[in-house]
Image (cartoon, helix red, strand yellow):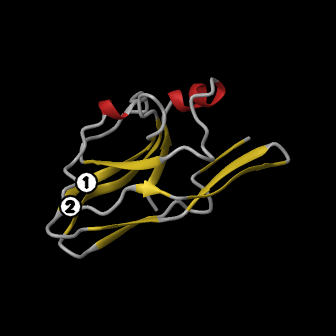
Amino acid sequence: MAAYTKIYAFTENVCEKVFNLQSDSLKVALSNSSIAQTVDVLSGVTEISYTNCSSRVITVSSSSQTSGTYSLVTTDLVLTASGGTVGPFRYVYIYDDTAASDQGICTFDYGSSITLNDTETFTIDFGSSLFTLA
């Protein structure tokens, strides 16, 4: 599984009501350039071309807390190349597309560059939850 890294400003944005993670539209941005934890908005990410890439919208399965621990559960996202290649990319940036400046949540580093050839798929596995907050 890829290495998860929280964007620093995410914590402040949660506390200052930037997000409504239960109903906001979450998306994936793909990059082949390293993304620092201080990159708090999408404009700071060098994105690849998505011409041949399927939808990058993340589906939220549940958003809830139990005994003071909040979990955002999302469905794994399958990206498909259609009509040509997608990539190369190494980093996946998760951001809130509803928030005014497309604020970042986290990144995943896959360790090496990935290129999808026409019709190939790539699954972004979010595990049991995208994140928990206690």
Spatial separation of the CA atoms under disc 2 and disc 1: 8 Å
Determine whether, in the image, residue 5 is placed left or right of residue 119. right
Residue drawn 26% across and 61% down? 53
Q: Position of residue 72 (x, y in %)?
A: 63, 51
Residue drawn 73% across and 50% down? 64
The amino acid marked with disc number 1 is Phe
Residue at the farthest right position: 67
Closer to viewer: mark 2 or mark 1: 2
Provide the secondary structure element on which disc 2 rests. strand
Determine whether, in the image, residue 115 is placed left or right of residue 15. left
Task: Relative to 14, say whether 51 is above or below.
Answer: below
Provide the secondary structure element on which disc 1 rests. strand
Residue drawn 35% across and 60% down? 55
> Mark 2 and 1 residues: CB-CB less than 8 Å, in contact?
yes
Quarter containing the C terminus: top right
Query: Which residue is tagged 2?
Result: 86
Task: For label 2, count other residues whose C-alpha is less than 10 Å away and answer few (under 14), some (14-19) or many (20+).
Answer: many
Q: Position of residue 116 (x, y in %)?
A: 22, 67
Q: Position of residue 18 (x, y in %)?
A: 57, 29
Query: Which residue is tagged 1?
Result: 89
